[in-house]
């Protein structure tokens, strides 16, 4: 039964006769168009938002599918995509080597556009105006790539995340590429849907918009209502001829890559290999069934949080060139005014995005690799919706820990360790000497880290690090470049709402929680590096970590206790045990003597005279500095304990695992060493008071 809607519909463009007759039985609707803006332009999964009217809900009972039915539907969708095109350089060579005129025409078009841009750069160099005109040329390059079509827009997007290749002005201009292209005819889109799914439109939809809601480089999106269930869905249809267009471009680029590899010594990387990797990613985006699988995996990993929404996929209406998913009634995250009109807070949404991105990048490693504002929507319920899953990436497991360790080394200003981190992050090959890089890191980060964590601006860090990467032989992996882009985008959005917002401050609770609770050996070592310096325990660092970690809603106190105990009592923990015993002795001494000092201070004056035996300096043979140090240490330790107790997850029962661990042989040995150290230290202090002689620094500790 078709739904009759009162919204006016403009005349349909000319179409094939058969689909026109069938579509006349379905209700075709179109909401009043909203003015287009650069910030609202969508990516390859064009933004869908509150600018468009929502189709009226149909009161039909939706029968949920069980898992078996859903798997069968997915299998059928995969069967429909069985013949999807896969990037194969050999096939492209065979296809275009016999079409010289077409190849020559496209080559001339590309070289004319890029040659004109290169000529301007040459003139700038001759005139000594390269730096002065850098911003202007960057904008011109963005426009040139847009005119050349989808392949070059994708190249521009890739370059926008590569600070090791492009200067900062080019990064900023190229990051504005939103893939906004003219729409293609509706009759081609509707014909594609019918051909791909094998049924007529009016048998699938009770309503579909007669014009696309949004368009991008690889496809365009319609809004529709499923006839069987009444669900409102987004239908993404692939642009016709897209495979031909990008196939020819990659054939030409690959040929250029061979020439660069052979004749250009300035580029150490295998350019052909880079082009092949990039082409594989673009071709993967052309398989909408794979995008649906990406969305499902993303939903499984991250939609456990109530504040994150991931639209579901309808496999019966999905193929290699048609993707159907839940319609998201939301506003693009770049539309701050529209968000505020809905009574939502922009900063809350950005914080959701930051926390989810941290989980993506550092917890599971599977992350949304195209995080521009058009792919992030604010729903009326205040949730953050992710859309467009064509381009995903993964952080290698070893790199996830290395990134957190890199942050620790940055906070500690350990620039030698920071430079060595680039090996683990695959920025540098093992044969590269990092010693020249250390001074560059020191020069930049010493100034940047003069700010507190709450004052650090992520973009400033990225820009400074980008300058370092640009000057030295770094090869930034794609996943890391996308990480930088993701957080830069989120901070940029937040700054519109609050100029003082800092993404690093918002991320720090997550890093603190991971350092305190993660049993990963690499992170355990990073925690030790952070807390111990020159053989002394930095209680202020532990206090700061707890303050920040407690801000993370997933922080559990006992999770921070057990990994530390296992590390302390493990076979490789001897060096740590020595440090812990030494620190525990000093803490015990501080608590005992501070308590004695507090007791003495609370006495009446006549009792103080008796206790001090007339000594005007009091009964304790301690310098003012020593007393202040003990009091400060005691107070800091008590604050740390109170922080642990203030946690919502604190429960005295969590100490039970501690008791069990302390029953182990190694723990009993440690306890004996600790008892001996405390006894020896307090005995020395007692003799000091009796003999009135200063305690020496050579007092032996176990």
Image (tube, rainbow, N blue to C red):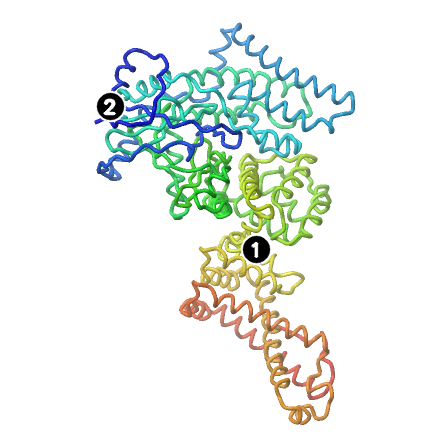
What percent of the width, then of the height, locates residue 399? 54, 43
Q: Secondary structure at mark 2?
A: helix
Chain-order first, disc 1 or disc 2: 2
In which quadrant is the N terminus drawn?
A: top left
Left or right position of 415 against 52: right
Name the one closer to the observer, 382 or 688: 382
| Residue at 48%, 29% in the rendered image | 43
Q: Secondary structure at mark 1?
A: helix
Which residue is located at x 55 percent, y 34 percent? 478
**Vertical comparison of 290 with 463: above or below:** above
Quadrant into which the C terminus falls: bottom right
Q: Which mark is residue 393?
A: none
Residue at mark 1 to residue at mark 2: CA–CA distance: 61 Å
Q: Nearer the viewer, residue 340 or 161?
A: 340
Provide residue 82's location: percent of width, then percent of height: 34, 23
Residue at 61 percent across and 57 percent down: it is: 529
Query: Residue at left 70%, top 75%?
Result: 626
Q: Residue 149: image x %, image y %? A: 52, 19
Considering depth in this image, is 605 or 423 the residue closer to the camera? 605
Kindly tell me whether residue 405 is visible in this rendering.
Answer: yes
Q: Which residue is mark 2?
A: 203
Above or below for 69 versus 509 = above
The residue carrying mark 1 is 525
For the image, the number of numbered tags is: 2
- Residue 442 coordinates in the image, percent (x, y): 71, 47
């Amino acid at each position: 039964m078709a739904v009759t809607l009162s919204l006016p519909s403009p005349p349909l463009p000319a179409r094939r006769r058969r689909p026109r007759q069938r579509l006349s039985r379905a209700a075709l609707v179109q909401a009043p168009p909203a003015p287009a803006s650069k910030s609202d332009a969508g990516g390859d999964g064009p933004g869908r938002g509150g600018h468009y009217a929502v189709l009226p809900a149909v009161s039909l009972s939706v029968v949920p599918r069980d898992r078996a039915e859903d798997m069968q539907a997915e299998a059928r969708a995969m069967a429909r995509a069985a013949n999807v095109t896969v990037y194969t350089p050999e096939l492209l060579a065979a296809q275009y080597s016999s079409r010289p005129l077409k190849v020559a025409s496209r080559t001339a078009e590309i070289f004319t556009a890029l040659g004109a841009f290169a000529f301007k750069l040459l003139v700038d160099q001759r005139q000594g105006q390269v730096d002065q005109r850098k911003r202007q040329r960057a904008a011109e390059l963005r426009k040139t790539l847009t005119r050349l079509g989808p392949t070059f827009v994708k190249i521009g997007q890739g370059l926008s995340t590569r600070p090791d290749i492009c200067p900062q002005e080019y990064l900023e201009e190229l990051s504005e590429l939103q893939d906004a292209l003219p729409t293609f005819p509706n009759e081609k889109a509707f014909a594609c849907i019918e051909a791909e799914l094998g049924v007529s439109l009016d048998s699938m939809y009770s309503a579909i918009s007669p014009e696309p809601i949004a368009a991008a480089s690889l496809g365009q999106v319609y809004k529709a209502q499923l006839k069987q269930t009444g669900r409102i869905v987004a239908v993404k249809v692939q642009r016709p001829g897209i495979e031909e267009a990008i196939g020819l471009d990659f054939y030409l680029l690959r040929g250029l890559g061979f020439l660069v590899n052979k004749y250009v010594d300035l580029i150490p990387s295998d350019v052909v290999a880079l082009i092949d990797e990039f082409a594989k990613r673009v071709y993967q985006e052309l398989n909408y069934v794979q995008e649906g699988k990406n969305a499902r995996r993303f939903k499984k990993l991250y939609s456990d949080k109530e504040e994150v929404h991931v639209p579901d996929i309808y496999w019966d209406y999905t193929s290699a060139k048609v993707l159907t998913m839940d319609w998201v009634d939301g506003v693009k995250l770049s539309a701050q005014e529209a968000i505020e009109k809905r009574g939502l807070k922009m900063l809350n949404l950005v914080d959701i995005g930051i926390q989810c991105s941290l989980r993506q990048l550092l917890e599971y490693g599977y992350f949304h690799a195209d995080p521009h504002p058009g792919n992030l929507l604010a729903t009326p319920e205040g949730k953050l919706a992710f859309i467009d899953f064509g381009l995903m990436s993964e952080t290698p497991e070893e790199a996830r820990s290395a990134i957190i360790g890199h942050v620790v080394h940055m906070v500690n200003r350990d620039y030698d360790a920071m430079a060595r981190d680039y090996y683990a992050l695959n920025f540098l090959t093992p044969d590269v000497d990092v010693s020249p890089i250390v001074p560059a890191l020191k020069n930049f980060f010493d100034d940047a880290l003069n700010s507190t964590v709450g004052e650090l601006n992520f973009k400033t860090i990225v820009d400074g690090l980008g300058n370092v990467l640009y000057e030295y032989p770094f090869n930034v992996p794609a996943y890391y470049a996308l990480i930088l882009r993701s957080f830069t985008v989120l901070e940029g959005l937040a700054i519109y709402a609050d100029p003082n917002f800092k993404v690093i401050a918002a991320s720090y609770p997550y890093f603190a929680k991971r350092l305190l609770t993660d049993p990963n050996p690499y992170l355990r070592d990073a925690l030790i590096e952070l807390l111990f310096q020159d053989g002394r325990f930095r209680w202020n660092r532990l206090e700061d970590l707890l303050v920040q970690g407690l801000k993370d809603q997933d922080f559990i106190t006992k999770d921070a206790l057990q990994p530390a105990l296992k590390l302390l009592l493990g076979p490789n923990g001897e060096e740590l045990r020595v440090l812990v015993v030494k620190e525990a002795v000093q803490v015990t001494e501080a608590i005992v003597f501070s308590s004695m000092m507090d007791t003495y201070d609370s006495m009446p004056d006549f009792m103080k005279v008796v206790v001090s035996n007339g000594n005007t300096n009091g009964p304790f043979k301690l310098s003012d500095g020593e007393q202040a140090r003990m009091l400060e240490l005691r107070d800091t330790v008590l604050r740390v304990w109170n922080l642990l107790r203030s946690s919502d997850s604190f429960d005295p029962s969590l100490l039970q695992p501690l008791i069990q661990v302390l029953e182990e042989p190694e723990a009993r040995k440690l306890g004996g060493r600790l008892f001996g150290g405390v006894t020896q230290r307090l005995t020395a202090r007692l003799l000091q008071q009796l003999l009135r002689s200063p305690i020496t620094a050579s007092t032996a500790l176990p």
